[in-house]
Amino acid sequence: MMQDRQAEWTRLLRAANGGDAEAYKAFLHAVTPVLRGVVRARSAGLPPDDCEDVVQEVLLAIHLKRHTWRQDEPAAPWCYAIARHKVVDAFRKRGRRVHVPVDDFAEILPAAPVADPTERNDIERVIDHLEPRAAQLVRAIGLEGQSIAETGDMLDMSEGAVRVMLHRSLKKLAALRERLIEI
């Protein structure tokens, strides 16, 4: 039965894409009730009117995109895929979310990462190995979150000069880090 349906839909859509208006009408009459069932099954929780809106969106998408269907493929999976995507779009539009209490999973969820309290001191010590102006630049951008423009204004430098100095300073810091790891 399912294979008969697929073969019929494929035959009708192929003829419709060839210009046969009656075949297109028959195709739409054949697919609409099945797609309505697919949409309703996948749209649990949506009001019936919303489900019907999704069905209409599916039919419109099929109409607008039927030229993209590969005629050597069966039509049914192509139609089902469009329906599935339109259902997902409907949930996104409506802001549908599933809420699961975290308490049910608290025992298996990983703990939130905790910042290393010594990390900032370690970073500061490595930055201290840079020349003072470069160290000030790296601290402003990397630790304080200032922008290139703000840092340039603070140090009386152009944005291009700040970028160049930042790049060179980070390169020096990477080399310093490698040396410290070897020790």
Image (spheres, grey):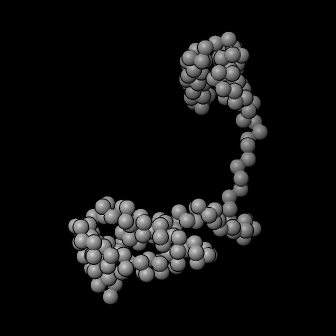
Is the N terminus in the top left, top right, bottom left or bottom right quadrant? Answer: bottom left
* Residue 100, image quadrant: bottom right
Foreground of the two, 34 or 81: 34
Query: Is residue 84 rendered to the left or right of residue 152?
Result: left
Is the C terminus in the top left, top right, bottom left or bottom right quadrant? Answer: top right
Camera sees residue 177 = yes
Image coordinates for residue 140, horizontal then vertical, percent: 70, 24
Image coordinates for residue 165, horizontal then vertical, percent: 59, 17
Query: Is residue 83 rendered to the left or right of residue 76?
Result: right
Which residue sits furthest right? 117
Image coordinates for residue 38, horizontal then vertical, percent: 47, 77
Which residue sits furthest top? 156
Q: Residue at x 73, y 68 (%)?
A: 101
* Residue 8, image quadrant: bottom left
Query: Is residue 10 rendered to the left or right of residue 109?
Result: left
Image coordinates for residue 40, horizontal then vertical, percent: 53, 78
Q: Residue at x 68, y 20 (%)?
A: 151
Q: Is residue 39 above or below residue 91?
A: below
Q: Residue at x 42, y 80 (%)?
A: 34
Query: Is residue 93 rendered to the left or right of residue 111?
Result: left
Foreground of the two, 56 or 91: 56
Q: Residue at x 29, y 84 (%)?
A: 4
